[in-house]
Every structure is written in C-alpha cells, then in structure tokens.
Image: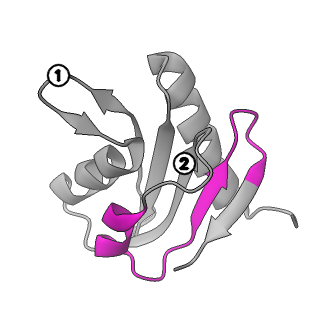
Amino acid sequence: MSELDPEDAKIITLARSTRARAGSAEGAAVRDETGRTYAAATVDLPSLKLTALQVAVAMAVSSGAESLEAAAVVTDDAVPDVAAVRDLGAKAPVLVAGPDGAVRAVLTD
C-alpha cells in the first residue's frame, strides 16, 4: 500500500488507541467535512450492540456533521459493515486496518 495521507494516518491512530483503551473488539474514527474527528469503540451491552463505525458516525451526526470525508476501522474482521458510513459519506474511503495499524483494504463502495 502506498504512503498514507497524514490525515488518514491520524484517524487510523485514533481508531487503534480507542480500541486499545477500551479493550474492545474494534476501534473506529471518522473525519467530517470540516476536518473534525470522532473516535469510538464497539458497544456490546445486553440491550445495545453497535459496531465502532456505527458509534463514530453517530457521534459525528450528533455533533452536527453533514458529511464524512473518510473513516477508519481497526478490526480482525475481513470486511466490516460500512452502511453507517455510507449514510453520511457515499464516496468516503473506509480504511480497514489490523490491530497493528497496517491498512489491509480501502473500501470505496
């Protein structure tokens, strides 16, 4: 994979650190149209289950974001669910990284 844009590297770092801090299965971060970032971990409660990407998108929306420029998710899953990202950023690239931060895929659809 080619050299990452510094802003994309930043959201991967935020996703990794959030995953580690929460001891969660996934960590995610999104960047909105103004450059603000939102980082989140998986929510796994008996009454509420959300992926890290869903939580990060919800945080962005609740803060007034109107669109997303990019998203990153750190996960062991091969292909994460990106539906929430697509709701706010139809063309936003989703960087999928392993726990070591190495980008395994960039999802654009």
Residue 64 versus residue 18 in the image, above or below: below
Amino acid type shown at disc 1: Pro
Q: Is residue 26 left or right of residue 7?
A: left
Which element is circle 1 on? loop
Image spot of residue 79 (x, y percent): 57, 57
Disc 1 crowd, CA 10 A, few/some/many (<14, 14-19, 20+): few
Q: Which residues are magenta?
A: 82-103
Residue 83 is covered by the magenta coloring: yes
Amino acid type shown at disc 2: Val
Q: Is residue 78 left or right of residue 62?
A: right
Q: Nearer the viewer, mark 1 or mark 2?
A: 1
Residue 10 versus residue 43 in the image, above or below: below
Mark 1 and mark 2: span between their CA atoms? 23 Å
**Label whose residue precedes the other's in the sequence (1 or 2):** 1
Instruction: Evaluate whether residue 40 shows in this view.
Output: yes
Residue 24 is covered by the magenta coloring: no
Q: Which residue is mark 1?
A: 46
Which element is circle 2 on? strand
The residue at 70%/62% (across/down) is 105
Q: Is residue 64 left or right of residue 53?
A: left
In depth, the one of 42 and 40 nearer the eye is 42
Q: Quadrant of the N terminus?
A: bottom right
The residue at 26%/65% (across/down) is 65
Q: Which residue is mark 2?
A: 73
Image spot of residue 64 (x, y percent): 19, 62
Q: Residue furthest left?
A: 47
Label for residue 38?
none
Instruction: Evaluate whether residue 67 shows in this view.
Output: no
Disc 1 to disc 2: CB gap under 8 Å: no
